[in-house]
Amino acid sequence: AGVVVQLFAVFTLHPPGNELTWLLSGAIFSVLPAILLFQYGKRDQEVWATAEECEGGKMLDDLLTQQRELLLEKQEADRQATVKLTKADNNTYHANVTRTRGEQVERFKESFTCPATLAFFVLKYTSISVSDIAAQHRGAQEPGLTT
């Protein structure tokens, strides 16, 4: 918005040379941060992912390419988390999460375009880690984790 105001001032107020220089400099240097914030401000891109999230995202993408739906569950003490992952035809990933703690049940869903963000979401909201998923799909039986 600041860039627009500065450019409006340049073209309508006809400022003298020194003020014109400052207005144009301010407009030019305001554009770059705005572009960077627009480009990198979304969490759903690989640039923000850790190495573990990238690895988990690749694994989830491979699994969802083979089978269109994955169901993961994990039980810890009085908590249970279930997540159903699907991949749409337009390479959008969908996660439906159900968390149970005692008598309380919480359900929510989210969509992603980046598989690394999907891995981040699964780890953060279900406590199912990349190693849990890897162990399960290598055939190793880890207690409390099923598909």
Image: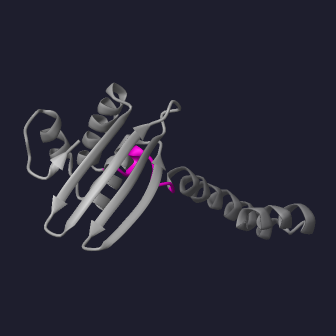
- The answer to whether residue 10 is left or right of residue 143 is right
Q: Residue at x 85, y 64 (%)?
A: 8
Residue furthest out toward the top = 66
Across and down, in percent, residue 5 comes to 79, 67
Across and down, in percent, residue 53 comes to 28, 47
Q: Which residue is drawn at 35% across and 59% down?
A: 98
Asked if residue 59 is among those painted magenta in the image, a careful observer would answer no
- The answer to whether residue 60 is left or right of residue 47 is left
Q: Which residue is drawn at 72% across and 62% down?
A: 3
Q: In which quarter of the image is the C terminus?
A: top left
129 in relation to 125, above or below:
above
Across and down, in percent, residue 108 comes to 43, 60
Residue furthest out toward the front = 103
Q: Magenta part of the protein: which range?
A: 41-49
Q: Which residue is drawn at 26% across and 35% down?
A: 59
Give the image quarter of residue 60.
top left
Q: Quadrant of the N terminus?
A: bottom right
10 in relation to 114, above or below:
below
Please identify the dominant SS of the magenta region: loop
Give the image quarter of residue 27.
bottom right
- Work out whether residue 114 or residue 89 is closer to the camera in this orientation and state it: 89
Across and down, in percent, residue 103 comes to 29, 74
- Work out whether residue 100 or residue 109 is closer to the camera in this orientation and state it: 100
Residue furthest out toward the bottom = 103
Give the image quarter of residue 126.
bottom left
Identify the coloring: one colour
Asked if residue 47 is among those painted magenta in the image, a careful observer would answer yes
